[in-house]
Each structure stands twice: as structure tokens, then as C-alpha cells.
Image: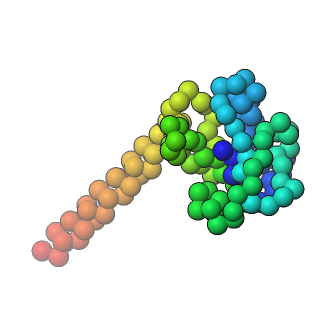
Amino acid sequence: MIGLKEKITPEKSGKLAALHEEYEKGKINLFVATSQGGIAIPGCSDVPVYFMDNVMLKSILRTAAGVVAFANGRIVGKWNLLYTPYRFDGGYGEELSGERWKRGAFFGVLLVMGVLLFYGRKKMEE
């Protein structure tokens, strides 16, 4: 599902090109959910558009434009339009695992440095 609470520009719609390509190949089902009329994605006129209550759409997306993946009747992934998935082999979210690892390593190093600074300060006071 592509959720839109506002009109998007052709530049932003380019981020959905991989999704639309997989939809055209028949590998994924795709639809647009929006809370207002007149919203369309440039270059994706063949994708069905459904209307949804604005509060419900806001609860699902948590952003102005995003992508939500469903599998077996449940949500398996959510992405802001900026981080739209680019591969669709069923491993939704796997493409961001490298980013998660980097973020975890950063905070791990930050924690170790904080402990060392605290320990060093304590040693200097003694």
C-alpha cells in the first residue's frame, strides 16, 4: 500500500518506480490509500486508488507519504517515502538491516566512550 496524505511531486514519485515496476510484473499487489480526492502518483495511473479516513491513514503511516507492506493479513513493514524498499523477495525490511547495524554500532561505541570517560574522571579524582 502506498499511503498519501498530500500530493507528491514527480521527483518524489520517482522513489516509487521500483514498486510500480514490480506491480507491473505481477510480483506484488499495489494500491494507493488516500484521504483526499485528486491525489495521483505521476507515472502510476494504472494503480488503483482507495479512500480512507484521514485519522486512520495518519495512524497507519505516521508520515505524509509512505509505503506499508502486508503479508498474511498483518503489517510486516512500514517505510517513509524516502526509505521505500527497493527489493521485493519477501524479505521486507531486510534492505535496511545494514543501516540498523550501523546505528547499533554507533550507539555501542558511544556507550563505551561514555563509560571510559566516566571511569577516567573517577580515576583522576582518586
Residue situated in front as seen by the camera: 96 or 126 = 96
Question: Is residue 87 or residue 59 the one in the foreground?
Answer: 59
Q: Quadrant of residue 51?
A: bottom right
- Residue 73: tell me if it is visible: yes
Can residue 83 be seen in this snapshot?
no
Which image quarter holds the C terminus?
Answer: bottom left
Between 111 and 62, the residue placed more toward the observer is 62
**Image quadrant of residue 85?**
top right
Q: Position of residue 17 (x, y in %)?
A: 75, 36
- Count of numbered circles on the image: 0
Residue 40 image offset from top left, x and y in percent: 84, 49
Picture colour scheme: rainbow
User: Relative to 68, does residue 63 appear above or below in the rendering?
Assistant: below
Which residue is rendered at x = 74% and y = 60% of the image? 35
Q: Residue furthest left?
A: 126
Residue 11 drawn at (x, y percent): 81, 47
Residue 73 higher or lower than 59, as above or below: above
Left or right, residue 59 beside residue 125: right
Residue furthest to the top: 25
| Residue 61, image x, y percentages | 61, 56
Residue at horizontal 42%, vertical 43%? 101
Residue at x 71%, y 51% (from the top left corner): 33
Give the residue displayed 67% in from the left and 34% down from the top.
Answer: 29
| The N terminus lies in quadrant | top right
Residue 15 as seen in the image, left or right of residue 117 = right
